[in-house]
Image (cartoon, rainbow, N blue to C red):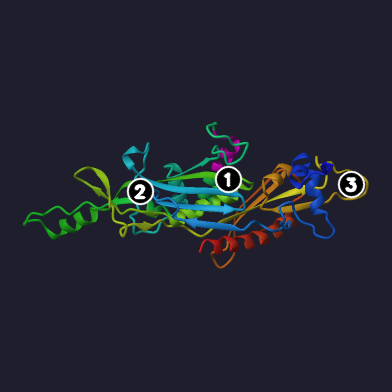
C-alpha cells in the first residue's frame, strides 16, 4: 500500500508574508510583547554594522568600499589637472601658498571652479528597481546633489592641497645694477597659481538594501581620507604641469574633520497615515527606525538625516534634513543628535 503524501501547509513563510502584506508584517514584529523588534531582527534604534575597506581600487588616487548590512558601495577618487587658462573668467589669487586663506574664499573657489565633482551610479543591477543600462534615476541625482552640497557646506576638502604654484626664477642682473633695484625686483617676483587638481568622486552601488545616502557619504569621506596626490610642478619650457611618478613624493589630501551622516525613518501604526486612533481619543503610535532597510523605507514617509562631527572637542551639527511627516519635532530632533553621536563613534572605529 503506497504511503499518502503529507498535506500541503496552508501557512505562508515569513518572506512571503512580508511581500504580500509588508505593513502588518512589520507592525506585528514591532508590537510583539515578548520581543519587539524589526523584521531584520534589529531594535528600532539599532543600526547595521559598518565595514570600511580603503585602497580597494589600484588605479584611483583614493578609494574605499563601505558595507552596511546588504548595502555595499564603492567610491573612487580620480585627480586630474585643470590649468587656470582653461577656467572661464578666472580671477588670479593674490595670496601665496604660505599665507592663511579665508574659509569663505575657499568655499567660493571650490564651487566656482567645480573642483569637486561627485557622481552616483545606481544602474548596476544592485536592486530589482535599478536595472543596468537605464538613464540616471531621480534617486541617483538626488544623492549626488546632496553629497555635492554637503562637501561644500562642511568644508571637507582644504583647497590649499589642490593648487599648483610656480615661482619664476630670478633673472641675472648686470654688474652695474643698483642694490635698490635688486630688492624691488625680488619683491615683484611672487608665486603664480598655474593649475588646480580636480577631484572626480565616482560612487558605484554593488548591492542596495536601503539607506543609500549614509553609505555613500561614508564611502566618500573614507575615499577622500585615503586620497594621495602626486607631486606636481609647472614646466615653463613646455608650459604644462608635470607630475612625478614616485610613490614617496605623493602627499595626502587635506581633509577637515570627519562628518558622519545618520538617517532614520518614522513608521506609523496606520498604513496610510490615517490617525483614526486620535479621533477616538487615542494617539496613534509610531516608531523611529534607525538606518532603515529597503522594506522599511518603502513603508515610511517621514525621514530625517543628521550630519555630525565629533572629531573636535565638542560635537558640531553640520547638517539637518527632514522630509515629510510631522512626527519628529524639536525634542525628538535633540534626542536624535545623541543617536547620531553614537553612530559617529561606530564609523570612527570602523575607519581605523
Segment colored magenta: 136-145
Residue projecting furthest to the bottom:
313
Seen from the viewer's position, the closer of residues 95 and 321 is 321
Query: Alpha-carbon distance for marks 1 and 3?
Result: 39 Å
According to the picture, the residue beneath numbered tag 2 turns out to be 93
Residue projecting furthest to the right:
280
Contact? badges 2 and 1 (CB < 8 Å): no
Crowd class of label 2 (few under 14; some 14 to 19; many from 20; radius 10 Å) = few
Crowd class of label 1 (few under 14; some 14 to 19; many from 20; radius 10 Å) = some
According to the picture, the residue beneath numbered tag 1 turns out to be 207
Front position among marks 2 and 1: 1
Q: Earlier in the sequence, mark 1 or mark 3?
A: 1
Q: Earlier in the sequence, mark 2 or mark 1?
A: 2
Q: Position of residue 186 (x, y in %)?
A: 21, 56
Magenta-drawn stretch, dominant element (helix, strand or loop): helix
Front position among marks 2 and 3: 3
Q: Is residue 135 magenta?
A: no
Residue projecting furthest to the front:
1
Amino acid at each position: 500500500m503506497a504511503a499518502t503524501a503529507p498535506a500541503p501547509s496552508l501557512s505562508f513563510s515569513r518572506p512571503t508574508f512580508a511581500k504580500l502584506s509588508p505593513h502588518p508584517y512589520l507592525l506585528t514584529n514591532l508590537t510583539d510583547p515578548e520581543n519587539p523588534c524589526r523584521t531584520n531582527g534589529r531594535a528600532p534604534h539599532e543600526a547595521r554594522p559598518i565595514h570600511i575597506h580603503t585602497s580597494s581600487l589600484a588605479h584611483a588616487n583614493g578609494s574605499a568600499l563601505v558595507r552596511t548590512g546588504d548595502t555595499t558601495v564603492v567610491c573612487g577618487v580620480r585627480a586630474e589637472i585643470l590649468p587656470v587658462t582653461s577656467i572661464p573668467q578666472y580671477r588670479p589669487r593674490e595670496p601665496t601658498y604660505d599665507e592663511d586663506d579665508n574659509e569663505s574664499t575657499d568655499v567660493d573657489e571650490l564651487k566656482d571652479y567645480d573642483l569637486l565633482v561627485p557622481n552616483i551610479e545606481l544602474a548596476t543591477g544592485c536592486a530589482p528597481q535599478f536595472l543596468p543600462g537605464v538613464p540616471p534615476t531621480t534617486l541617483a541625482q538626488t544623492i549626488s546633489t546632496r553629497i555635492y552640497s554637503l562637501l561644500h557646506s562642511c568644508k571637507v576638502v582644504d583647497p590649499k592641497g589642490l593648487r599648483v604654484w610656480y615661482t619664476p626664477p630670478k633673472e641675472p642682473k648686470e654688474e652695474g645694477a643698483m642694490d635698490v633695484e635688486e630688492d624691488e625686483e625680488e619683491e615683484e617676483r611672487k608665486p603664480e597659481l598655474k593649475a588646480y587638481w580636480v577631484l572626480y568622486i565616482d560612487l558605484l552601488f554593488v548591492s542596495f538594501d536601503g539607506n543609500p545616502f549614509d553609505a555613500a557619504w561614508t564611502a566618500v569621506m573614507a575615499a577622500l581620507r585615503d586620497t594621495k596626490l602626486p607631486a606636481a610642478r609647472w614646466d615653463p619650457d613646455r608650459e604644462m604641469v608635470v607630475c612625478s611618478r614616485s610613490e614617496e613624493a605623493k602627499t595626502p589630501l587635506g581633509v577637515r574633520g570627519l562628518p558622519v551622516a545618520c538617517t532614520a525613518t518614522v513608521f506609523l501604526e496606520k498604513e496610510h497615515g490615517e490617525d483614526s486612533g486620535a479621533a477616538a481619543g487615542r494617539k496613534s503610535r509610531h516608531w523611529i527606525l534607525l538606518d532603515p532597510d529597503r522594506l522599511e523605507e518603502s513603508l515610511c514617509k517621514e525621514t530625517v538625516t543628521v550630519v555630525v562631527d565629533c572629531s573636535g572637542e565638542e560635537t558640531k551639527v553640520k547638517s539637518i534634513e527632514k522630509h515629510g511627516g510631522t512626527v519628529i519635532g524639536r525634542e525628538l530632533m535633540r534626542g536624535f543628535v545623541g543617536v547620531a553621536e553614537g553612530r559617529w563613534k561606530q564609523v570612527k572605529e570602523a575607519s581605523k
